[in-house]
Image (spheres, coloured by chain):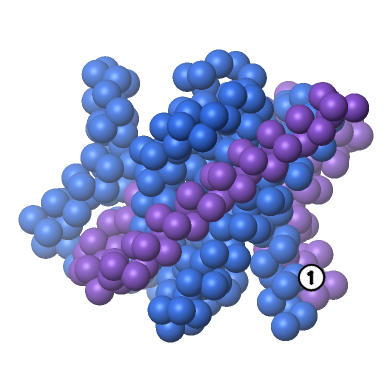
Amino acid sequence: MKTRWFLQLFTIIGFLLLGSGIAKAFHIPVPGSVIGLLLLFVFLLTGIIKLEWIERASSFQLKHLTILFIPPITGLFLSSAFLEILHWNVLIILIVSSICCLLGTAFAVEWIEKRRDVK
Amino acid sequence: MTMFIGNVLLCLVTTIVCYYICLKFYLKYKKGWLNPLYTASFLLILLILVCPIQVDSYKEGSTIFNYLLQFAVVTLAVPLYKQWSFLKKNYKKIFIGVICGTSLGVITVLGMSQIFHLQEQLLASLIPRSVTLPIALTVSSGLGGLSSTTVLFVVISALISLTIGPKLLNKLGIRSKSAKGLAMGTSAQMLGATRSLVWGEEEGAMGSIAMTISALFLSVLVPVFSYFT
């Protein structure tokens, strides 16, 4: 059981390394981890990799995703630079762009659905 | 070298212990504000300030988490695969909605940063603010942004969308289930996907798909775009 768990981890690490290697070798500007994601997705779809082979390791990772964000947040508060960063203009940008993102998606989807209904 | 390994171990152990304690509390009382993201960070800050731990050695040790983050990005393929049939059935509205929303968000950031004359490093941390954290951090470090600033922007953006999003969508008369789910997932990623699950199953599925697709879209768009300009 233990070895299986490690095998699952190594499969995912293998895809990460493969993705980074491809990104470096072909000078693709996309992050290597994203290429690894797409590769793993394609391999899952074609059935070369079975979901059961990696499911335990990946669900463990996704369940505890939160822990990865704790060190950056801690680092931010310890550096005390966050008061300098959070000027009013940055806050305005954050608010306005969040609303634009939200409404852009919502209206685009509604538009498509309405168009389909007319047809 | 031994110093570095020591720092990595120190960082890993303190972070995991804090996370574990806070997770237990969160699972026991099930309150939203007890989310380990806030409580564990708070506990960790206290620990570092009270105990004789050097701030710099903690920060040096936390580089290990960058590798774990890349690992997490790869595992996002699994939820995407599980939702494949749902995605195939609704691909048109998902792609158009997510691409419109994400690009509009980036365009407003770019436009307003011109108006306010923002520093380039700050801008680099602002651009990926709408997508899920592991990918946002990868994109921002690729652009030369600071990871700690990016985390702050991502969390604040998600909280803004989460607090005003549902009310705003309601006021503007958006009734469609997919529109609500996709909008929340695109703008508030993980938090939005969880929120849209409250509306119903279809909204929730749309929310989590929107989270992955918008992150993928941005992570491909931004580097390619900056490569050509």
Q: In the image, is residue B23 above or below residue A39?
A: above
Q: Name the residue located 90 percent from the left edge and 27 percent from the top edge.
A: A119
Is residue B36 something one can see in this rendering? yes
- The amino acid type found where label 1 is placed reads Ile
Residue in front for this viewpoint, B133 or B185:
B185
Is residue A15 something one can see in this rendering? no
How far across and down, in percent of the image, does residue B165 sit?
45, 38
Residue in front for this viewpoint, B229 or A74:
B229
How far across and down, in percent of the image, does residue A113 sit?
76, 30
Element class at badge 1: loop
How far across and down, in percent of the image, does residue B212 sit?
65, 42
Q: In the rendered view, does B106 fall on the left or right side of B149?
A: right
Q: Name the residue located 26 percent from the left edge and 48 percent from the top edge.
A: B41
Q: In the image, is residue B120 above or below residue B45?
A: below
**Would you call the spot at circle 1 few (<14 residues within 10 Å), some (14-19), or many (20 or more)?**
some
**Which residue ends up furthest to the front in the rendered image?**
A118
Q: Name the residue located 55 percent from the left edge and 16 percent from the top edge.
A: B200
Q: In the rendered view, does B91 fall on the left or right side of A92?
A: right
The residue identified by callout 1 is A28
Residue in front for this viewpoint, A65 or A81:
A81
Q: In the rendered view, does B131 fall on the left or right side of A66?
A: right
Q: Name the residue located 52 percent from the left edge and 77 percent from the top edge.
A: B144
- Chain letter for mark 1, please: A
Query: Quadrant location of the N terminus of chain B?
Result: bottom left
Query: Quadrant location of the C terminus of chain B?
Result: bottom right
Q: In the image, is residue B141 above or below residue B175?
A: below
Which hue belongs to chain A?
purple
How far across and down, in percent of the image, does residue B135 sit?
58, 54
Which of the 4 image quarters holds residue A27?
Answer: bottom right
Q: In the rendered view, does B226 fall on the left or right side of B144?
A: right
Which of the 4 image quarters holds residue B7?
Answer: bottom left
Which hue belongs to chain B?
blue
